[in-house]
Image: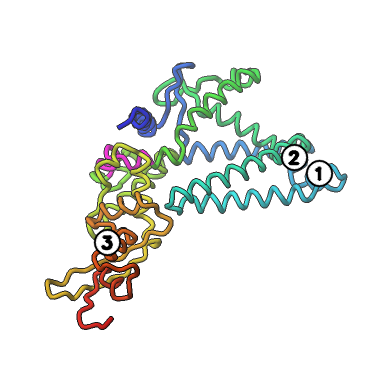
């Protein structure tokens, strides 16, 4: 195992511990950053709605109203607005595709396409935002950010005592508030979907999840409604991976060397969750020596390493058709194989058939 994988695995252990506890510790400020649950998010949404009503009453226009006004005055072009909508839709579609593609080559191409579109989208959105000025949505976003920071920072482990009183928080200057926003964002970035899936695939999580039979009350000690968002996401991924291990016909499990690489583990589980991409045809060899069965399997978009890994997990062997053709040509002393030669490569008994 290389140092990069070791470092990643240590980080995942820390993130897992934070998810279980329901908060992250910030050494810089000696405080806890609470992971929000449904009740917390509902409170934030209520206060955000209050902010919206306040903005409308003060005469602010919505983003859509402001865009229409800017287009009418020739300040913003309809083509640019249409391009933003197009890019947003294509990024969403490409992201969904990325989650279903197996091939490393196609994944790379998909990511590059998304990154290119995101750069263009970001440039157009920045230009539009600069022209728009303050809108109802912008006012709400600022307020939501402030509300979230207030409700996430606590002094104690139980997350009961807020880091500030309401009066102290209202008196924070913009630089101080921005500092806490940066700390919050850096902490939240660690709990990405990718990292949560990596943790869900780890034995130290799945073993206990199996013992708890996937029950949040047994595993987390509280009902599902009381789980934080990150806890819910982890248990959801765990349930999917648990299903892969329980519902495969051959009792497959990840290859041993995959446990050294969190990303390979996730890929293995995701591959086995996508059985529809696997097309199987069976050819029965009726040779007198026995009734062995040859299974021809193709994994759409998979490279050779992924095909071999999938086959190894099932106790199967990957046949390289090109190598087999070359071998057959040497054995038969031919420069070109006929149909019966090809059938024999695939395990068919060609006795009695004329060439």
* Lower position in the chain sequence, tag 3 or tag 2: 2
Determine contact: label 2, label 1, CB under 8 Å: yes
Instruction: Using the image as rendered, state which of residue 77 and residue 180 is in the foreground.
Output: 77
Residue at the spot 55% in from the left edge and 26% down from the top edge: 150
> Distance of mark 3 from mark 1, alpha carbons?
67 Å
Q: Circle 2 sits on which residue?
A: 128
Q: Circle 3 sits on which residue?
A: 327
Dominant secondary structure (helix, strand or loop) of the stretch shown in magenta: helix
Image position of 278 with respect to 90: above or below: below
> Distance of mark 3 from mark 2, alpha carbons?
64 Å
Quarter of the image with the C terminus is bottom left
Per the image, is 287 magenta? no
Image position of 187 with respect to 300: above or below: above
Q: Nearer the viewer, mark 3 or mark 2?
A: 3
Residue at the spot 26% in from the left edge and 83% down from the top edge: 354
Range of the magenta residues?
Answer: 198-209
| Left or right of residue 347, residue 290 in this image | left
Classed neighbour count for the residue bearing mark 2: other residues with Cα under 10 Å, few (<14), some (14–19), many (≥20) = some
> Distance of mark 2 from mark 1, alpha carbons?
8 Å
Residue 215 percent across, percent down from the top left = 30, 46
Classed neighbour count for the residue bearing mark 1: other residues with Cα under 10 Å, few (<14), some (14–19), many (≥20) = some
Q: Determine which of the numbered discs, if any, sits on residue 76 in the image.
A: 1
């Amino acid at each position: 195992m290389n140092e990069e994988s070791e470092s990643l695995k240590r980080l995942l252990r820390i993130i897992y511990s934070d998810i279980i506890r329901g908060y992250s510790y910030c050494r810089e400020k000696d405080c806890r950053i609470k992971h929000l649950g449904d009740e917390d998010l509902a409170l934030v949404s209520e206060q955000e709605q209050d902010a919206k009503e306040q903005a409308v009453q003060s005469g602010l226009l919505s983003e859509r109203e402001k865009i229409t006004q800017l287009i009418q005055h020739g300040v913003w072009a309809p083509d640019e607005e249409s391009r933003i909508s197009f890019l947003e839709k294509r990024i969403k579609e490409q992201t969904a595709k990325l989650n279903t593609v197996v091939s490393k080559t196609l994944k790379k191409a998909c990511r590059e396409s998304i990154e290119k579109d995101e750069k263009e989208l970001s440039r157009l959105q920045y230009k539009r935002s600069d022209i728009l000025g303050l809108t109802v949505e912008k006012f709400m976003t600022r307020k939501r950010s402030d509300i979230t920071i207030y409700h996430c920072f606590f002094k104690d482990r139980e997350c009961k005592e807020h880091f500030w009183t309401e009066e102290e928080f209202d008196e924070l200057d913009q630089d101080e508030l921005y500092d806490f926003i940066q700390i919050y964002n850096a902490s939240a970035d660690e709990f990405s979907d990718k990292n949560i899936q990596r943790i869900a695939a780890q034995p130290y999580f799945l073993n206990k999840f199996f013992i708890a039979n996937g029950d949040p009350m047994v595993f987390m000690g509280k009902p599902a409604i009381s789980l934080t968002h990150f806890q819910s996401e982890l248990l959801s991924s765990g349930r999917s991976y648990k299903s892969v291990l329980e519902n495969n016909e051959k009792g497959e499990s990840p290859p041993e060397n995959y446990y050294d690489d969190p990303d390979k583990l996730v890929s293995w589980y995701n591959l086995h969750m996508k059985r529809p991409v696997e097309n199987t045809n069976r050819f029965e060899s009726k040779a007198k020596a026995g009734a062995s069965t040859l299974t021809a399997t193709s994994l759409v978009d998979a490279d050779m390493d992924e095909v071999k890994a999938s086959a190894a997990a099932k106790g199967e062997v990957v046949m390289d058709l090109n190598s087999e053709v070359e071998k057959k040509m040497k054995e038969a002393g031919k420069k070109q194989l006929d149909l019966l030669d090809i059938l024999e490569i695939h395990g068919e008994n060609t006795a009695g058939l004329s060439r």
